[in-house]
Amino acid sequence: MTDSYLGKLYGVGVGPGDPELITLKGLRLLKCVPVVAFPAGLSGKLGIAERIVQEWLQPEQVHLALNFPYVQESKTLTEAWQAAAEQVWQYLMQGQDVAFVSEGDVSFYSTFTYLAQTLLHSHPEVEVQTIPGICSPLAATAALGLPLTLWNQRLIVLPALHTVADLETAIATADVVVLLKVSSVYEQVWAVLNRHGLLQQSYVVERATLPEQVIYADLSDRPQLKLPYFSLLIAQVHRADLG
């Protein structure tokens, strides 16, 4: 088999949840590839990415659910990436293009990066192309009706925090701080924001752009919130002066 017979792997960012926020390029590709892959949902439910694109998929397309465990243990994750890459390879080696869809953007804390890197490690001849999507901080600020940054404001985006020191450093450094997947550490984050007097200019958005989206503005009286996994917090450390 020569490289010319190999299918191409596409990573397609499909946005934060609203199916109408897929790019035109991404939608065109999704409608024409023979195989569409996505992270499998939990407990028999649709995953977020599959839920976003389901109305655009064609019956004749292969719908390939790939299992990625929600754990931090590196050995388990590596084995899952290898298994997923091998599943994708079975189609690519037959000359079929595969589009892997990911919520948000495929280069922004996305599972696609691990899948593509694992595949390329075993099969470096495969061509990989990424198509960007709207990431959650942009969707959340649109829902809030706020700009994410203005003028020369400095922005820091942090994934789920492992130490409060990360947030303390961010507050001391940036004008705007975004905390992704904040649900597991919300109470500790609230205490830090309270200590810095930032609760009134902080916001939580859960499930941005989805029908069940919820917004909390001014966290002063919300030391405890039961948040879903896909929740983020935006703190305006220093508000921009419009002059």
Image (cartoon, rainbow, N blue to C red):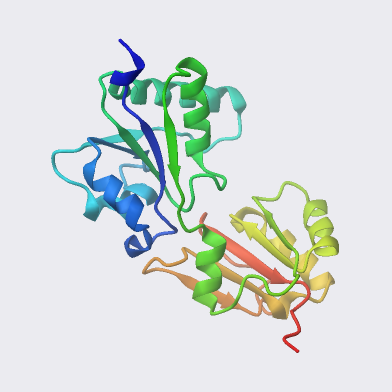
Q: Residue furthest bottom?
A: 243
Q: Is residue 114 above or below residue 184?
A: above
Indicate left or right for 214 with 177 as reference: left
Residue 35 on image: x %, y %: 26, 35
Q: Residue furthest left?
A: 60
Residue at image position (75%, 70%) is 152
Q: Is residue 211 above or below residue 221?
A: above
Residue 146 on image: x %, y %: 58, 78
Residue 108 on image: x %, y %: 56, 48
Residue closer to the observer: 205 or 88? 88
Q: Residue furthest top?
A: 1
Residue at image position (35%, 26%) is 88
Q: Quadrant of the C terminus?
A: bottom right
Give the tally of numbered discs. Answer: 0
Residue at image position (25%, 19%) is 94
Q: Quadrant of the N terminus?
A: top left
Q: Is residue 24 above or below residue 35?
A: below
